[in-house]
Amino acid sequence: MVAVGDIARPPGCSPCEQTATAALAKTFNPNAVLVLGDNQYDSGLDSEYTAEYALSWGADFNSIVHPVPGNHEYITSGAAGYFQYFGDNGVTTGVSSNPTGGYYSFNLGTWHIVALNSNCTNSGCADALTGGTTSAETAWLQNDLATNTQPCVLATWHHPLFSYGWTLGASSVLPLWTALYNDHADVVLNGHDHLYERFTQMNPSGAADPTGIREFVVGTGGESLNGLHGSSPPSTLQADDSSDYGVLVMTLHATSYSWRFVNIGGQTIDSGTGACNSKGTGASAALAREARAPTVAALSGPPLVFHVRPLRSSLTATLRRGLPVAVQLSRAADVTVTVSVRRGRRLQPIASFYETESEIPKPYTEIFLRLPARQLTGLGAARLVVQFVAIDSAGHRRVERTSVALGRG
């Protein structure tokens, strides 16, 4: 079995590293391929899937692929492109009448594989740094595990609970981890962070546990790479690589598994074996709700560094292409932006924006805030007040407020 996420660059890419990772995966002649979300950038449109993903991973593996959606798929409302592309190619995606669906399970040898959607909450689905889960999905997972008779369990979704990379993990998926842990599941595979990480077996609080779950983060499919963010990774992080595109190759035995992370040069970067846990009894809904309380210690991390600097622009240029802003972040964060125009002593809000790691994908990024022309047309000049509020997955909050003077020239 081959697994990887964060795969295909947008149409027109050069180089297109997803071609290299697909070619690498093909050399292993896998029985199954698990793609871990953000399979097609930037927005997961059907046209983007058809233009890039379909030419590499799609062409080689659509007959054996088992996908999950990532947050980039949800830049398109309802991840419509994801469901359309895979649906048109006869690939199971777990589509249901529930708009926050997109989860399913299947058996592979003696293993039970659960594919989950980490992009939805009870309020709906969205492109969000921290992801989420719904009460319906958690209940479905508990029931699925309770009826499973296979001795080994592996689960996939996009947002990792634990990571020391750009996103620093997502505590919102703790209910999924808890249900799996209570059932004595064995392996969780995630993407989202653009690097490779392997953790020791852990409990939902992030403490080492010999009967816990081993998590792999494999966001190395071709889109881009990001390194570790901090100088003191947790002791549970046993291996990492942020320099190589590559794939995770797993062999699933009757009561054990082995793994290799192989880069596109064919070099094995990390490898090992593990035994399956004894089968659990399944977690009741009440038990899973009670288990949501543990604090995810690994999500504390170093302090969030956040700075913004509006770049030089005229009112005319801003109306044409947007207000340019240089953003520095020490790790991924969701950034809420409020823009107001000063009219005498009064501040009039004219626009707001919600920028996620999709728009700010690296430590130094330039973004453009497209302001409503009707609020600024006819002015000889404008003075704006812009407030930025950044919140990372650990809940660290930073606020920046700046004034911008725009002349007509």
Image (spheres, grey):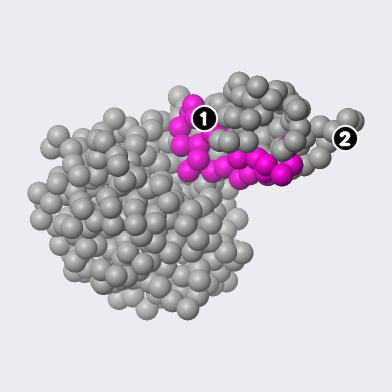
Where is residue 221 shown, x and y percent of the image? Answer: 28, 44
**Magenta residues (range):** 352-376
Residue at the image position 52 percent from the left and 46 percent from the top = 129
Instruction: Please determine whether, in this image, residue 86 is positioned above or below residue 366.
Output: below
Instruction: Please determine whether, in this image, residue 38 is positioned above or below residue 397.
Output: below
Q: Which residue bears the numbered disc 1?
A: 366
The residues tagged by marks 1 and 2 sit, at their Cα atoms, a distance apart of 29 Å
Magenta stretch holds residue 362: yes
Amino acid of disc 2? Arg
* CB under 8 Å between discs 1 and 2: no
Q: Is residue 200 visible?
A: no
Instruction: Please determine whether, in this image, residue 152 is positioned above or below residue 73.
Output: below
Amino acid of disc 1? Glu
**Counting residues from the N terminus, which is met first, the one under dot 1 or under dot 2?**
2
Residue 224 is left or right of residue 260, and the answer is: right
Where is residue 96 shown, x and y percent of the image? Answer: 43, 76
Label 1: how many residues lie within 10 Å, few (<14), some (14-19) or many (20+)? Answer: some
Residue 128 is left or right of residue 143, and the answer is: right
The N terminus: image quadrant: bottom left
Where is residue 138 shown, x and y percent of the image? Answer: 50, 68
Where is residue 274 shown, x and y percent of the image? Answer: 24, 51
Residue 203 or 99: which is nearer the viewer?
99
Q: Which residue bears the numbered disc 2?
A: 346
All told, the count of numbered labels is 2
Q: Quadrant of residue 21?
A: top left
Residue at the image position 14 percent from the left and 46 percent from the top = 23
Asked which secondary structure carries label 2, the reply is: strand
Residue 223 or 77: which is nearer the viewer?
77
Most distant residue in the right direction: 345
Instruction: Please determine whether, in this image, residue 67 is positioned above or below residue 308.
Output: below
